[in-house]
Amino acid sequence: MFPMKIFKLIFLFLMITLFMSCTANLKVNKIKSKLEPSSNSGRFLSTKYLLKKGNNEIASEIISKSQNLNLDITLAELNFKSYLINGNFEKAKEFKLVAPSKLNQLPMYNLPDFLINLKNEKILNPNDFNFIKNHLPGFNIIFEKLNYIKLLNANDYDHIFIDSKRSSVFHLLIFENTKLENQIHSDMKKINLSLIENILYLGYLKRKYPKIFEEKIYEFSLKFNYDIKSLKLYFENEKNRKIQKNHKFIFANLFSHLSLVLSSQKNIPSSYLKILHEISHYLEPTLGNSNYFLADLYSNEKNYKIALKKINRIDEDSFLYLYSQIKKYKILNFIDKDNSNLFLDSIKDKYPKNSEVLSIIANNYRDQNKCDKAIQIYDELIERSVNKNNYNYLKAICLEKLDNWEDSKKILIELISTNPNDAYILNYLSYSMATRNEDLPKAKKLISRALKVENNNGYFLDTLGWIQFKMNDVNKAIRTIQMAIELEPNNSEIIDHLGDIYYKVGRKKEAIYEWNKALTGNANNKLKKIIKSKLKKYTK
């Protein structure tokens, strides 16, 4: 009898578990059915929207479920594009086998084949890919470098021509250990290099000019606030990579560099920049910089989960590993405050003297009104940094919070004397003077200068409106702050200012309306407490 009871209990438990599992699956399927359209036209619209918003992973999942992808050219184009944006170049090539024939009219149609060959280090004939070269931004530069490699492999120096004015570190790496190397090194620009170019050039100096390398690496560390130990370790590991013989490494860097260059052009979509960085990762997965910049693109679109995925692809020996961890902390700060603080502790333990890490710690202290602690760190950063202005500005903010206005003002005036068009420092000094009713005509001149630099800045207009109010120019003040609210509709402080002005001129109902509206904005706890006390006092 006893074993039978056990058997019945086990059977009952299994049945309950199965029922609960089925119920849970039904709920999940119901949720998915709400999110996923059932028709091809619905999938097309959803995919277009998601790609525009940067959520290409879900877009790819939805469009791949469409029926007749091999017949519908519109859906096929979207599916092909989603593969490219996700860096699935092998899948993109496979899809071409079943896609409609008209897909071959796309400028990127042969891109997967081109990249797979490049990854396998097959020497390509640039003429076979003229359509890509002529239609995809930046690819003329890629093919120029490919042609150099082709001529170099054929030992055909007679047909190699490099414009000395356009010589770059990428030319230098291609022609390293050839008879053209010294001339290219002499011609190439060595100032105002991008981050990627700087790292490549430091690697070259490490191999060829160790003494110059030791000088330049310290300059780089100071300029970019980079941990010197981590930087040196990266270049020690780099010795094993034989970079000068690895064309994939050169092109991986070049694609990522191109994406950064093209990002300043208005007509280049974010999706194209992502593809270039994904190409970089595909060619050299251990590189790191492509994923770092991909995380930037996705973070700007508020696609934080995808951004974290890209960061997690970065190896610890990448030169951007440290900065990727700082970026990860900043993303976590948006979506998971508790985990972000724990993660920051782990970064502090590993990089206790890194300037960027110290800056984050100091800024956190400042936000928590622990300004004495923040100032100690800012002083350390000011002493060791080449670019001291930002740390001096942050120190001045802390000094003002500690009611040491005179020392704060002295720093702000010195900063403006060295950079008269720094609009944010002009605004901070002007607003601080206005709150103290100190030399209002001068404060107005300062904010007017800031507005010449950025005339559509809501914060600056708020400062101007507040000064106008204090100078009894009420009508102008109201119009100015109303304009500020149009630019910053969720800013509780600006809305609160408008409420204060309304109350002072006897427009009590409008004041109460604005104060209530300010409570629904981005007010912190301190401002909410002030607004609530005004509402309690003036609504009696």
Image: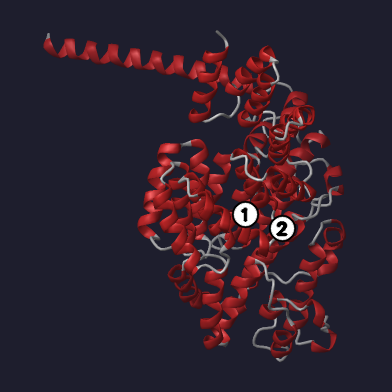
Secondary element at image label 1 = helix
- Who comes first in sequence, dot 2 or dot 1? 2
Residue 422, horizontal then vertical, whole percent:
69, 55
| Amino acid, disc 1 | Phe
Q: Is residue 83 above or below residue 490?
A: below
Query: In what quadrant of the picture does the N terminus appear?
Result: top left
Q: Is residue 452 above or below residue 165?
A: above
| Amino acid, disc 2 | Ser
Which numbered marker is on residue 259?
A: 2
Task: Tell me the crowding category of disc 2: few under 14, some 14 to 19, or many 20 or more residues within 10 angstroms, Cα based.
Answer: many
Could one spot residue 20 in this view of the protein?
yes
Of 258 and 484, the residue lying toward us: 484
Residue 512 quadrant: top right
- Scheme by which the image is coloured: secondary structure
Residue 250, horizontal then vertical, whole percent:
65, 71
Give the Cα separation between the discs numbered 2 and 1: 9 Å
User: Is residue 231 toward the left or the right of residue 282 in the image?
Assistant: left
Task: Tell me the crowding category of disc 1: few under 14, some 14 to 19, or many 20 or more residues within 10 angstroms, Cα based.
Answer: many
What residue sits 58% from the left and 65% below the top?
387
Could one spot residue 316 in this view of the protein?
no
What residue sits 80% from the left and 54% below the top?
265
User: Is residue 102 toward the left or the right of residue 119 in the image?
Assistant: right
Residue 321, horizontal then vertical, whole percent:
49, 59
Residue 241, horizontal then vertical, whole percent:
52, 74
Q: Which residue is mark 1?
A: 293
Secondary element at image label 2 = helix
2 and 1 marks in contact (CB < 8 Å):
yes
Q: Is residue 64 above or below residue 165?
A: above
